[in-house]
Image (cartoon, rainbow, N blue to C red):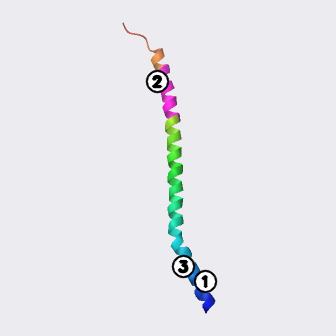
Amino acid sequence: MKFFTQISAFVNSLRSEEKGATAVEYGLMVALIAVAIIVSVTLLGTNLGTLFTSVAGKLPVIK
């Protein structure tokens, strides 16, 4: 009976630690999403800047 009580206590302690692990997992996901957004905005901004410069260079100058 003592062994069952110890096993039960161990399982209950794992359940209580699951919330902390879930918070860490969500934190990692948010960090990865933030990095993906920063990289995509940086690349998109550079490409858009190049595109606008190219289009502006091809426009005729009006006097």
Q: CA distance from mark 3 to mark 1?
A: 9 Å
Q: Residue at x 54, y 60 (%)?
A: 25
In front of the other: 49 or 8? 8
Q: Identify the residue under disc 3.
A: 12
Where does the C terminus fall, quadrant-wise?
A: top left
Per the rendered image, the range of residues in magenta is 43-54
Identify which residue is drawn at 48% across, 27% down: 49
**43 shown above or below 13:** above
Query: Hey, what amino acid is under mark 2?
Result: Phe
x, y percent for residue 17: 53, 71
Secondary element under disc 2, as helix, strand or loop, is helix
Point out residue 32 in the picture as x, y percentages from the top left corner: 54, 50
Residue at image coords 55%, 77% = 13
Q: Is residue 45 above or below residue 4?
A: above
Disc 3 versus disc 2: distance between alpha carbons? 60 Å
Q: Amino acid at mark 3?
A: Asn
